[in-house]
Amino acid sequence: MSQTTLQEWAAARADELPGSAPEQPFGPDSTVYKVRGKMFLLLSDTTGEPFVTVKATPADASTLREAFDDVIPGYHMNKRHWITLRAGGALEEELVRDLVTESYLLVVETLPRAQRPVDPATFGQQPN
């Protein structure tokens, strides 16, 4: 995987999520995706190589860091709740897309019900 592919996968998924909007509050080298004003994704290359940072449950964050060399504690974020993905070749598109979606849902869960663009409990499920 090329270094920019990781960010392309993450941005493409974020663009599909209801209420998601990109911003550049830290300058042109970093793009932040927010839902209702709360960040769920950071794309940057401030370290010299492109990376992606997403929110995760502490248990998932720990498991992912143990399973993948390309998953490290969140760059400039709370290390228990955020992970950074690096483009090293072991991360597949489906995993990156799933991690972006999970980060989005974790943030949506914290919003007041009236502000939620989706119901996190049923998002992505097929209707019966």
Image (cartoon, rainbow, N blue to C red):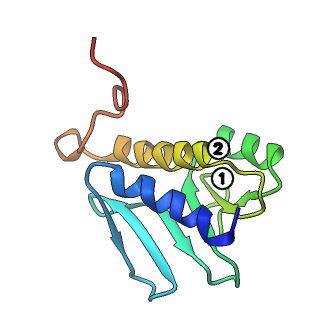
Q: From the viewer's perspective, is residue 6 above or below residue 55?
A: below
Residue at image position (16%, 42%) is 114
Which secondary structure lies at badge 1? loop
Mark 2 burial class by Cα count in 10 Å: few <14, some 14-19, many 20+? some
Is residue 69 in view? yes
Which secondary structure lies at badge 2? helix
Residue at image position (77%, 49%) is 65
Q: Which mark is residue 80?
A: 1
Indicate the amino acid at tag 2: Pro
Horizontal and vertical percent position of residue 22: 35, 69
| Residue nearest the observer in this picture, 66 or 14 | 14
Image-based side of 40 in relation to 84, left or right: left
Q: How far is the residue under mark 2 from the one under mark 1?
A: 5 Å
Q: Which mark is residue 58?
A: 2
Mark 1 burial class by Cα count in 10 Å: few <14, some 14-19, many 20+? some
| Residue nearest the observer in this picture, 88 or 26 | 88
